Amino acid sequence: METGKITPQAEDFPSWYQDVVREGDLAEVAKIVKGCMVIKPHGYAIWEKIQADLDRRFKETGHKNAYFPLLIPMSFIHKEAEHVEGFAPEIAVVTHAGGKELPKDEQYCIRPTSETIIGHFFSKWIDSYRDLPMLINQWANVMRWEMHTRMFLRTTEFLWQEGHTAHSSHEEAKEEVTRMLNVYGDFAEEVMAMPVIRGIKSDSEKFAGALQTQCIEAMMRDGKALQAGTSHDLGQNFGKAFDVKFQSEKGREEYVWQTSWGVSTRLVGGLIMTHSDDSGLILPPRLAPVQAVIVPIARKPKEKELVIPVVDKLAADLKAAGVAVKVDDREGKRPGEKYYEWERKGVPLRIELGPRDVTSGEAMTKLRVADDKVKMKIDDLAADVPGILDTFQQTLLRRALDFRKENTVTVDSWSDFKDVFADGASKFVWCHWDGTKETEAKIKEETKVTIRCIPLPGQGPAPEDGKCIYSGNPSNQRVLMSKAY
């Protein structure tokens, strides 16, 4: 892996991805800790912006933040049979503490997800319908043992949020599932400029222990799907496992209806693979830690006397206009080196200011996705840049939508389906499926293609009668299929 070089997407997409992460200074592999990564300041700043926007949306929908233990008793994991079966291969178990081996009934797992321990505390906190709904969110780290890792997309330890709610009726819980899925979908499109399809997971792909899982699916620039967020209807499974009961308005004792929902640092990986190019990272302005960088071009003392006051005033004016601006006045680096670095880091807008620019009253500007530089009046920049950034944001969304449209097909035969995915290729495919696990498993076995979701209303083709591409059995709705991360 050559530092400074980015492998072209068309040549080797996985290598391109790793190169963009490295050259964008986002993260590095923590080789001393198997399967883990170090998120570097630029990468973590993106995650902080994701956190801040989502946290605001969660609180606007009535949720409160809390924090639960990292260590979960193994006995809790075993209480919900389907849940433990789904997570057993990924669980890291603490068997020794304080220099001694722990008895079997006192061993812990490191949090793979928190439905069990939160269910335990819900049973202590909930007594009456007056305590409901209980709307909790947790920002935390989790651990799932991974053999094949890729930074941000799949690591042993990762950061996420997990929402957990309890309700008095199934209808109310189902409304919560869809509400939070739409929070994720709106965030993805409005802030990440990443278009998503909202749908329901097949029973084979749903969360272990859930009645139903809803998801958002995004197309990456290699045509593969990324599951970018999930929202689960847990029914009363965990309520019964952890004895979470409440007294209803009619005086009856009933089990609560629960939900859980989450997104993770995987979103940073999705951001990279939705927008970036062979020159490096491209960040939508609403998630860019630095939205505009000003590069002063002044070496001699007299040049600095002329340029720096103008740069400082422009930076202050941009900041006052709500722009996250950075002045790169580092000594010992040529302007070209700085341009190269900030392009690699995905900064949306670059502003170059030298003595001639100050004298003419015009600065050279360069958008991250533009081929050419554009002259702009220095005095107009503070007023114009916010609008330029908004347009840039919409350009990225439109570009991603166009790419998805160009790489989405409707297929009605098994031979055509196999042709789409021949030689490692991938697209989004709308096709009929007979609804059986057996057919789903055979399609996956033969092509490595999975059902990404059954679209929610308005998210895909309207329901229609047809025949399953594999079995030929009747089907009344097309589903979304693709290879996936």
Image (cartoon, grey):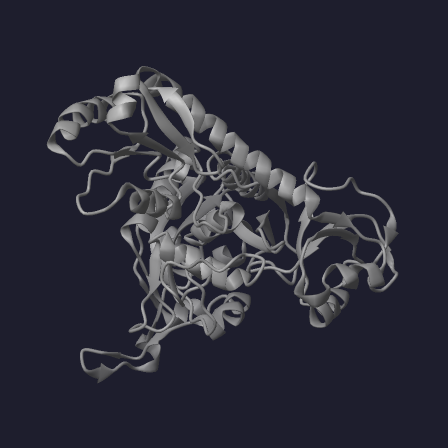
Asked if one can make out residue 63 in the rendered structure from this viewpoint, the answer is no
Q: Quadrant of the C terminus?
A: bottom right
- Does residue 408 appear in this view? yes
| Residue 248 at x, y percent in the picture | 49, 41
Question: Depth check: 151 or 475 in front?
Answer: 151
Left-right relation of 303 to 198: left
7 in relation to 463, above or below: below
Q: Is residue 246 above or below residue 37?
A: above
Identity of the residue drawn at 38% across and 29% down: 365
Quadrant the N terminus occupies:
bottom left
The residue sitting at 18% across, 78% down in the picture is 98
262 to 241, vertically: above or below: above
- Seen as rendered, the residue at the extreme left is 301
Name the quadrant containing residue 483. Answer: bottom right
User: At 77% from the left edge and 66% from the top edge, which residue is drawn?
Assistant: 439
User: Left of 383 or right of it: where is 448?
Assistant: right
Classify residue 381 by image quadrant: top left
Q: Nearer the viewer, residue 7 or 222?
A: 7
Residue 321 point in image, percent of width and height = 31, 21
